[in-house]
Image (spheres, coloured by chain):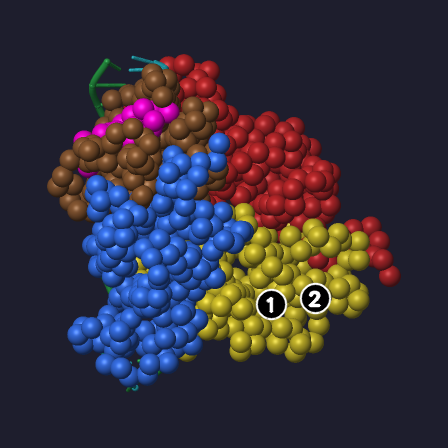
Chain colours: A red, B yellow, C blue, D brown, E cyan, F green
Amino acid sequence: MNGCSFSGEGRGIGTRRDESKYNAILDAAVLVMAESGYHHAQIARIAKAAGVADGTVYLYFKNKEDILISVLRHTIGEIVDKATETSAKAASAEEQLRSLVRLYFGELGVRRDLAMVTQVHLRQVDANIRREIGDIMKPFYNLLDEMFERGVGEGVFSPNLNRRITRRLIFGTMDETVSAWVLSGAKYDLASLSNDVVDALLYGLTGPKANDTEQKG
Amino acid sequence: MNGCSFSGEGRGIGTRRDESKYNAILDAAVLVMAESGYHHAQIARIAKAAGVADGTVYLYFKNKEDILISVLRHTIGEIVDKATETSAKAASAEEQLRSLVRLYFGELGVRRDLAMVTQVHLRQVDANIRREIGDIMKPFYNLLDEMFERGVGEGVFSPNLNRRITRRLIFGTMDETVSAWVLSGAKYDLASLSNDVVDALLYGLTGPKANDTEQKG
Amino acid sequence: MNGCSFSGEGRGIGTRRDESKYNAILDAAVLVMAESGYHHAQIARIAKAAGVADGTVYLYFKNKEDILISVLRHTIGEIVDKATETSAKAASAEEQLRSLVRLYFGELGVRRDLAMVTQVHLRQVDANIRREIGDIMKPFYNLLDEMFERGVGEGVFSPNLNRRITRRLIFGTMDETVSAWVLSGAKYDLASLSNDVVDALLYGLTGPKANDTEQKG
Amino acid sequence: MNGCSFSGEGRGIGTRRDESKYNAILDAAVLVMAESGYHHAQIARIAKAAGVADGTVYLYFKNKEDILISVLRHTIGEIVDKATETSAKAASAEEQLRSLVRLYFGELGVRRDLAMVTQVHLRQVDANIRREIGDIMKPFYNLLDEMFERGVGEGVFSPNLNRRITRRLIFGTMDETVSAWVLSGAKYDLASLSNDVVDALLYGLTGPKANDTEQKG
DNA sequence: CATGAATGAGTCTTCATTCAT
DNA sequence: CATGAATGAAGACTCATTCAT
């Protein structure tokens, strides 16, 4: 998240007053939304959790929707930043995919409240917000696309695959995995699933084939 | 779901005669929810769209939540019924998967309003409703599991795959595909994606291998 | 209750169709109102308890209010009829008072549901209904007045007492006693209180005086 | 009731600053309830009468029921406070009774709206509210009990009287008297009845006896 | 910048009553 | 006479947002 993560981007709000207060509200929002869901997360409770007055929230955010968007811009942005870093270091496309999935599961896996918001409550919002969320996710999608291109270039990924479908295969699987983990109560370790998930993504239902060294029978 | 889908199952509600009115309300609910989302779908508008008085809605449904659940029980149930039928006819696990995906995309692909409800607005509801939705989906999940077992038995699916991950691979991908289609405005043909999606599911990012005789060319 | 108890007296309703059904509804009304109070007693439940359709209720009663009034006219009327009989047989004013109180407590004491309606739920209604209730009670008040006149004539009651106040002394005490009994859960025997209550009414707080034969000290 | 009568006692509600607004709502509630009864007293009308927005009512009161309870706690509490004061000054039990009745009639006699609420509309509420009302009245009942004990000690009240019946004699008569006054349209002066009522309570129907020196002539 | 009291639009649900059959 | 499905008016309560201090 390259600098511009703070404040509502030209909305005329949040002209970088008290950044600590801004972050306090954002953190409180994640907490309260994780607990009650977007629709039941009252501004009053977020304000109280952040230790500010109700009205103060509106000095930093345009409205409730803006809080949610900002939470996401912030957290997803952080993940994307790390993912970009990690990707740069990857020796191969496969390794890159592996590290992306590990990173995604790792980040959400240690913050159940955040995962709760992105996986469950995020979906409670109106279609127009969801579209905006799509924009926020775009850098992450781009990273996946790059990774795939690279894999094709390296000759390990099938060049016949539809790009859009590939993206949905990867993100849909990751998403469903995190959702199931959250809804199950986050009882197991999410990050430890990453290798098996990547294997499934790489080889599909049929599994790795014989000519990848040897076939099984 | 076989025939007795009408009415709220022992809730003492919805035992009224006029099945056409029951269906009218259900259809109206899908319409209004597709348009405005669950939270903004007012009973008054559903009633008006169904051509009945507000109070009449409560002769057939316990409350707003019950309408949503019923919509899903009805529609998902229908899909599951068809999927069960189709599965019985499939000559192989692969064919079964192919027909399941085709069916799922086909059913939702011709009713954008319904897809809108299941993919977008469905997620606006509280955790307890979501849990109930999980129950409704269970038969579909079971079908996927059976299909996978069969494939393993047939020697075409990898026995090393984690079952849970497999289920998430398949459903996550399908779900993400439908969601993307809905959010894009349903501008393209959803059903026509099914073969490519199935290929991605079967072979993953690496694609089908040489020893699978021929593929795509 | 001299004959005219059945039906709404010239309201154009209940032209003596099926008297058994009329009574069934009346009984059901007492039951349901005792249980839930006037405001929560739904016509639908009364109808079901009476074994008739909702609409049928309106063939016998003008509206919900009319049912309540009729219940009272009926039951209070019955009590008044018996009270009139009893009064005629009384050898003295004191004996008459004693029998009136005993009768009142006795009748309500064996029908907690009825007492519940008259003492608790009756009071939930609007002032205009309460006024009508006053009319129904009038014959009973008259009986009390007669009794008092007689007592004055017999030289046992004080001629200086304000008639209205006397009436309120008697009825207020009876009413409060029954109310307390009902609200306590009707755990003790109401009728057995009548003699003590009458003593209190006759002699007040100071109790019977020496010149009434002998003082106890 | 001594000063701290403001606010809903630890309900977390009504801790707002503006006591004048709290009182305005309370006064408005008495007015509207007196006019229309508890059940027909709409929050919107109370709010308008108090000159505040609908929502503001809920800053000071938990709900409609809480308003009613608060009205009573407030007004009955005030009467009880005064009654306690008055009782302390009374030279004898009889004088105490006389002042209690005079006070009760006097307070309600100058506020027909309040009497309307306590005597008529109060009784429209559910049993659980009535029980709470019982608690509010308890101090008043206790005062009556004390008064009676004292009278017995002074040798003017009969020690043979059942305490419970005595309480019902006194309160029932007072209650009935106020109710009748309210339902009559409050056309006469209520307070002026107090002496005659007390006489009735003291001596009952038989009136004061010869050995009570002189009475009335 | 911060506060938090005040606002008031928005909505599900109930239930007495009607009327077509 | 009887039915009971249908009606639709009515009302308490929530909570995002504002603005005077």
In the image, residue A150 sits, relative to residue A58, either above or below, namely below
Magenta includes D105? yes
Which residue lies at the image location 53% right of the left edge and 76% below the top edge? B4
Magenta includes B115? no
Chain of the residue under label 2? B
Q: Residue D158 carries which label?
A: none
In three-dimensional space, the C-alpha distance between marks 1 and 2, rounded to whole angstroms, equals 9 Å
Which residue lies at the image location 65% right of the left edge and 42% below the top edge? A185
| Mark 1 element type | helix
Q: Give the range drawn in magenta.
A: D93-112
Quarter of the rendering containing residue D137: top left
Q: Circle 2 sits on which residue?
A: B147
Q: Circle 1 sits on which residue?
A: B100
Q: Are marks 1 and 2 on the same chain?
A: yes
Residue C128 shown left or right of residue A7 in the figure:
left
| Mark 2 element type | helix
